[in-house]
Image (cartoon, rainbow, N blue to C red):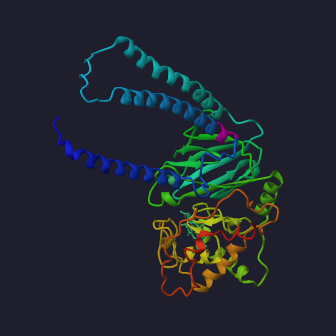
Amino acid sequence: MFVRERELPRGRGLARKAAVALAGLWVALALAGCSGPHPQSTFRPVSHYASTLNALFANTFWWTMLVLAVVWGVLLIVIIRFRERPGAEPPRHVHGNTTMEILWTIGPALIVAFIAVPTVRTIFQTQSAAPRDALVVEVIGHQWWWEFRYPQYGGIATANEVHLIQGRPVDFVMHSADVVHSFWLPRLGGKRDVNPQPETVGNTAKRVNHIVLTPDSIGVYPGQCAEYCGTEHAVMRVRGVVQTAADFNAWLQAYNTPPAPPAGSVAAQGKQVFETHMCLACHTIQGTSARGVIGPNLTLVGGRQTIGAGALPTSEASFQRWITHPQGVKPGVLMPGIQEGAAGMPPTGLTGAQVQQIAAYLGSLRIPAGQPGANPVAGGTPAAATMAPPAPAVPGAGLPAAATSHDSMKSPTTSGKP
Ligand code: HEC
Ligand SMILES: [Cu+2]
């Protein structure tokens, strides 16, 4: 080619500067990914299942790095050795080389076969049936929250936080009440789809999926729905709460005998309002007359880190905001507010005072932090794991200021301890 030779040096200088700038940007971007708590990183496994997956990934990763090094090595040698030199003869043109073609067909085939061995082994390991002593937890996906039932413990149900026992295998038996969702607790292992319309044909459960894993570290581990399932898919979060067996039992006991608000207190008034208004059509609270099953079970709801499947950090202010105008917090949510209906139900029509009473009651439904059965503080990273949209103005509700976006970054239920 006949380039104007005098212009070359300037062009090269520019190209070099651009290359350096690009490389710098690339390194900066790559390093930016290294900061932060990474609450949902699969590289910090907390179950045998997740460790197995992580080990498989690391294994494959280093082998591919080896392939990368070889390919780039050869490429660089060729680029440098056979670069164009002034006055050099054009290289001889070759077409077809049977030996090379056989080699570069067999090579990748061998690599794939090589990676397939540990992969298939891991698939079998992580698909094995649950041991007999496994804790059975029924997982039911709903638009847009998670329900967990414990058939071995009287069929009790909870929502959005699944309580697990350190060192005891758990058998998640999973399906959906509406559309396909995907259950995913990255640090514990997963993810797996939950399908609607489960049925039992003969002795086999159809369209029911399982994950069997054994949590090995105490903590609270966030996760989320991983299959687009409608408007609020992004706010369909879940937490795995891994406790000691003793703490799990304490939680069970508190669940079956939830704290009763002192007679005459605001919370006691709230209980009364709850039991005499629409709430009981959709919600259950153990030890009360509320037996609804359309929405999440609210027993011990005050002890969960978030409400609305990760929409707000739990606090009385958040309860008020949620009950007053749930659409403002989670647009599309299938729960009516004081002025707007939803899910075929009319508005609840509660007054500001009644909302405050219910909020006080729901806030009291918890195991005080630090007591046996309460959520462990270590391991979980509630910060930034809630998604609070800007506080909506609620005309005429007369409520105290809703949680600010700053408040939403910390979880009141865990801030008491380091
Ligand atoms: C039509 C049924 C329905 C009625 C009536 C209803 N809710 Fe709900 N509620 C829901 C559903 C569904 C959710 C889950 C929403 C989500 O997270 O997507 C919910 C969520 C909640 C939550 C958050 C629970 C959690 O674990 O995150 C609270 C608290 C709550 N409702 C309180 C109330 C109160 C108090 C009333 C009465 C004033 C009420 N609800 C009336 C259906 C209902
Ligand atoms: Cu979903």
- Find residue 39 and report its image quarter: bottom right
Name the quarter where the C terminus is drawn.
bottom right
Q: Observer-nearest residue: 58 or 126?
A: 58
Residue 125, image x and y in percent?
A: 65, 31
What secondary structure prevails in the magenta region? helix
Residue 298 is one of the magenta-drawn residues: no
Residue appearing at x 68%, y 71% in the figure = 412
Q: Observer-nearest residue: 393 or 13?
A: 13
Q: Relative to residue 25, is residue 291 drawn left or right?
A: right
Residue appearing at x 79%, y 63% in the figure = 254
Q: Observer-nearest residue: 92 or 44?
A: 92
Name the quarter where the N terminus is drawn.
top left
Residue 167, image x and y in percent?
A: 77, 44
Which residues fall within the magenta stretch?
A: 48-52
Q: Quadrant of ligand 1?
A: bottom right
Q: How many marks?
A: 0
Residue 51 is one of the magenta-drawn residues: yes
Q: Relative to residue 178, is residue 319 drawn left or right?
A: right
Please, is residue 172 above or below residue 361 in the view? above
Residue 67, image x and y in percent?
A: 49, 29
Q: In the current view of this chain or complex, which residue is farthest to the top?
A: 98
Residue 53, image x and y in percent?
A: 62, 38
Q: Relative to residue 335, is residue 160 drawn left or right?
A: right
Please, is residue 236 above or below residue 315 in the view? above
Residue appearing at x 78%, y 55% in the figure = 248
Residue appearing at x 58%, y 29% in the figure = 119
